[in-house]
Image (cartoon, coloured by chain):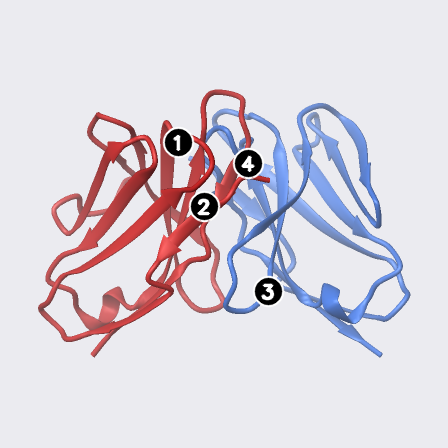
Chain colours: A red, B blue
Amino acid sequence: GAVVSQHPSRVICKSGTSVKIECRSLDFQATTMFWYRQFPKQSLMLMATSNEGSKATYEQGVEKDKFLINHASLTLSTLTVTSAHPEDSSFYICSARGGENTEAFFGQGTRLTVV
Amino acid sequence: GQSLEQPSEVTAVEGAIVQINCTYQTSGFYGLSWYQQHDGGAPTFLSYNGLDGLEETGRFSSFLSRSDSYGYLLLQELQMKDSASYFCAVGRSSYKLIFGSGTRLLVRP
């Protein structure tokens, strides 16, 4: 299957700082990317859907000013957690697909710890 | 709204067969997918049902009944490495996926 690379795999940051997570499609052009958050022993919660070149669509309850998503190219989407707080500590996972009716593939995930 | 329900935990012995059920309520339906996730890892795709019936992929099979809003994942010849969390999800992965709560499977020797 296609490869989606997510970086960094782990990050620790201080409360109040911002953290950027990158999601890259390595061998295909990703027209749509999805960002999920997963707390320990819980399910994956969809945060937002981003289409290349347009604004992301956020799920209800997700603060768009706190979780900034940029999908400026067909191979890269970024999620920036702004002014991070300990409650933002979680596992963030991206997923990317190449077009309609194509399979989507998951990145390896990023473990964010805010201290 | 959308909701998917799965058992929280299932335990089985190596070599056995286990079935993980999933019931769903959704405003739109694009099929039922199943994913496996090991601790600390990302989900990996196992199976997809767009129509009623059984889909078989090696040791894993998945079933869907749209009239009952119900599906299940069947794992045969269980191996220790199958110990993981299993999620059902509504929507094909080409559309956005809404995940169930997950079932933690523990395979014992």
Q: Which residue is mark 2?
A: A4
Of marks 3 and 1, the one in the foreground? 1
- Chain under callout 2: A
Residue at horizontal 42%, vertical 50%? A5
Pick out the residue farthest to the front: A27
- Chain under callout 3: B
Q: Which residue is mark 1?
A: A30
Of marks 1 and 4, the one in the foreground? 1
Residue A30 appears at what percent x and percent y? 39, 31
Element at label 2:
strand
Kindly indicate whether the residues beneath marks 1 and 4 are on one polypeptide chain: no
Q: Name which residue type carries label 4.
A: Val
- CB of mark 2 within 8 Å of CB of mark 1? yes
- CB of mark 4 within 8 Å of CB of mark 3? no
Kindly indicate whether the residues beneath marks 2 and 1 are on one polypeptide chain: yes
Q: Which residue is mark 3?
A: B38
Determine whether B25 is above or below A42 in the image.
Answer: above
* Quarter of the rendering occupied by the N terminus of chain B: top left
Within-10-Å neighbours for mark 3: few <14, some 14–19, many 20+:
some
